[in-house]
Every structure is written in structure tokens, then in C-alpha cells.
Image (cartoon, rainbow, N blue to C red):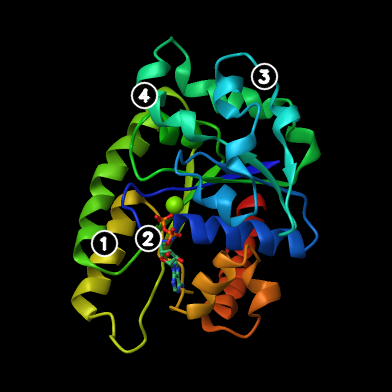
């Protein structure tokens, strides 16, 4: 199983949207996919049709040692299986203080690793212990960002966390690339801004994906219907872009594997 985290501490950069697109897109390509919703706001779980208020057990209980991960797996209509972190994870930074707390997710995933080809992990807009757990459990990460100055500035903070994770809990963590999302075709990304994005990528030792994701109303519509973009709006700009982004990502993975 290959685990991929979507992370950026900035909210609204399409972490959740990209997790959903990647998970359902890979499932449609025939892979077995598990999506993990580590955001206590549970957007991914809600968008995948999960009933988050009536869950006996969540990942929080697994982290507390009071539940088994395999008992939490839910089937969704979007082609992938889902693990919900749950609302209780909102207190994770204070509730989990023991030594080794960076490894909770990584250890929990051991049990089900053989059952999946990919695990796609959505993270909260913070750089706390949940994001550290996601990065510690992952082979690689993708950084979605919008092409605006604040999003670009935030990348250096994220970089500090990545360096810490590599030093202490996952020395092999790879950064697959920066993915520009929510692109408005009417406003050209200025050359100056694009140069900054490329510079941030260089600092991280990674690239900017050639394919960026355009804005489409279909994204919100399909999320509201708890459906996946590829089935719901196959011709929408964002859908077409996500398809070729997944192709680009998979091509990169193959080349790395050689
Ligand atoms: N390509 C897109 N086109 C239109 N709306 C988008 C697109 N990507 C994301 N959105 C919308 O932007 C908002 C933020 O996206 P979301 O994936 O929730 O970001 P994050 O998880 O990083 O906070 C959501 O309302 C989502 O529907
Ligand atoms: Mg989100």
C-alpha cells in the first residue's frame, strides 16, 4: 500500500476536494483505495456520505487503544473505503501527549495495509499532531495551494514541519509536488506569482505539477450530492484537470519506482 497525504495548513486550498478526487479517480482506475479523514471537521466524511454523528467508534478510539482500525472501515458510494477521524480529534494535540504519539496512524494502518493499493489522507488546516501523524504514516505528500501570495508564504512554515518529520519520525517522506488548485481562468496567474510558486517548490526540493486544477461549479455541486466528480460531471473543467493530474502523478510514481 502506498500512502499519500494532502497537506497545507491553509484552509480552502482544496485538500479535501483533491483527496476525494484522487481517491475516487484511483478507485475508478481499478485500485483498492482507502481514504482517511484526519480533519476533525469531517468534511471528507460528510462529502462521502458518512453519518458522522452516529458512529460508535472513530479513529480517536483507535489512537486511545480502545478500538481496531479494521472495525471502522466504511464503504462509500464513491468507490473508495473510508476511515473517519471524528469530531473528538479536535482535542488531539492535548489528548495525546505520550511518547511515540507521532506514530499512532502509522501503527494503526499496519493492520490493513495488505488490503489496499493506496491510502489517501486528508488533513486539517493546522500543523499539529494530526498532520504529523499523517506525514509520518505516508510515503509521499502533495501540497495543494491556490496561486495567491498568502498561500505561497505559508509554504515555508509547512517546510519546517516537513524537515522535522524527516528528522524525527519519517526520514523517507517524499514531496510529490505542489498542485495549483481553484484556478480562475479569467485571471491569469501573474508571472511574478508563478515564479514564487516555482521558487517555493525548489526550496522544498520538489516540482509544481504541470497540470493545475481550474474552478468549476461542478465541484461544489457534486460535493453537495455526495457524489464523485468523474461520475457526476465528467466534462467539467475541474474533472478533466483532476483526471490528467492523476495521470501525471501516476507517471511520476512509476518513474520513481524504476
Ligand atoms: N476546482 C474547484 N472549483 C470550484 N470550487 C472548488 C474547487 N476546488 C475546491 N473548491 C471549493 O473550495 C472550497 C474549499 O475546498 P476544500 O477542498 O474544502 O479545501 P480545504 O480542504 O483545503 O479546506 C470548497 O467549498 C470546495 O467545494
Ligand atoms: Mg478540508
Cα separation, mark 1 vs mark 3, equals 44 Å
Residue at mark 3: 67
Provide the secondary structure element on which disc 2 rests: loop
Provide the secondary structure element on which disc 3 rests: loop
Observer-side mark, 2 or 3, equals 3
Tell me the quadrant of ligand 1.
Answer: bottom left
Numbered tag placed on residue 199 in the rendering = 1
Give neighbour class at mark 4: few <14, some 14-19, many 20+ (Cα, 10 Å).
few
Give neighbour class at mark 3: few <14, some 14-19, many 20+ (Cα, 10 Å).
some
Q: Nearer the viewer, residue 224 or 121?
A: 224
Which image quarter: residue 63? top right
Residue at mark 2: 13
Q: Look at the numbered discs 2 and 3 and tell me whether their residues touch, using CB distance below 8 Å.
A: no
Q: Is residue 74 above or below residue 247?
A: above
**Residue shown at 66% from the left, 27% from the top:** 56
Cα separation, mark 4 vs mark 3, equals 20 Å
Provide the secondary structure element on which disc 4 rests: helix
Q: Earlier in the sequence, mark 2 or mark 1?
A: 2
Q: Earlier in the sequence, mark 4 or mark 3?
A: 3
Label 2 residue near ligand 1, CB within 8 Å: yes
Label 3 residue near ligand 2, CB within 8 Å: no
Q: Position of residue 22 (x, y in %)?
A: 61, 60
Q: Earlier in the sequence, mark 1 or mark 3?
A: 3
Which image quarter: residue 91? top left
Q: Is residue 161 above or below residue 107?
A: below
Q: Is residue 171 visible?
A: no
Q: Look at the numbered discs 1 and 3 and tell me whether their residues touch, using CB distance below 8 Å.
A: no
Observer-side mark, 2 or 1, equals 2
Numbered tag placed on residue 93 in the rendering = 4
Cα separation, mark 2 vs mark 1, equals 19 Å
Q: Is residue 164 visible?
A: yes
Amino acid at each position: 500500500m502506498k500512502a499519500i497525504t494532502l497537506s497545507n495548513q491553509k484552509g480552502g486550498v482544496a485538500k479535501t476536494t483533491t483527496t476525494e478526487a484522487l481517491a475516487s479517480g484511483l478507485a475508478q482506475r481499478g485500485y483498492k483505495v482507502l481514504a482517511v479523514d484526519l480533519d476533525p471537521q469531517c468534511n471528507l466524511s460528510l462529502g462521502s456520505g458518512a453519518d458522522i454523528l452516529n458512529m460508535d467508534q472513530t479513529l480517536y478510539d483507535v489512537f486511545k487503544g480502545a478500538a481496531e482500525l479494521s472495525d471502522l472501515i466504511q464503504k462509500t458510494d464513491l468507490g473508495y473505503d473510508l476511515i473517519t477521524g471524528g469530531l473528538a480529534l479536535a482535542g488531539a494535540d492535548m489528548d495525546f501527549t505520550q511518547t511515540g504519539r507521532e506514530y499512532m496512524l502509522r501503527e494503526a494502518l499496519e493492520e490493513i495495509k495488505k488490503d489496499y493499493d493506496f491510502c489517501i489522507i486528508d488533513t486539517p488546516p493546522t500543523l499539529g499532531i494530526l498532520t504529523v501523524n499523517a506525514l509520518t504514516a505516508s510515503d509521499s505528500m502533495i501540497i495543494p495551494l491556490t496561486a495567491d501570495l498568502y498561500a505561497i508564504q505559508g509554504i515555508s512554515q509547512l517546510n519546517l514541519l516537513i524537515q522535522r518529520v524527516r528528522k524525527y519520525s519519517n526520514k523517507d517522506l517524499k514531496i510529490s509536488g505542489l498542485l495549483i488548485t481553484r484556478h480562475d481562468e479569467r485571471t491569469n496567474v501573474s508571472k511574478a506569482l508563478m515564479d514564487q510558486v516555482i521558487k517555493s517548490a525548489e526550496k522544498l526540493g520538489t516540482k509544481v505539477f504541470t497540470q493545475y486544477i481550474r474552478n468549476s461549479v461542478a465541484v461544489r455541486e457534486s460535493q453537495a450530492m455526495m457524489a464523485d466528480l468523474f461520475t457526476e460531471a465528467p466534462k467539467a473543467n475541474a474533472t478533466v484537470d483532476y483526471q490528467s493530474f492523476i495521470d501525471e502523478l501516476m507517471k511520476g510514481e512509476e518513474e520513481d519506482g524504476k
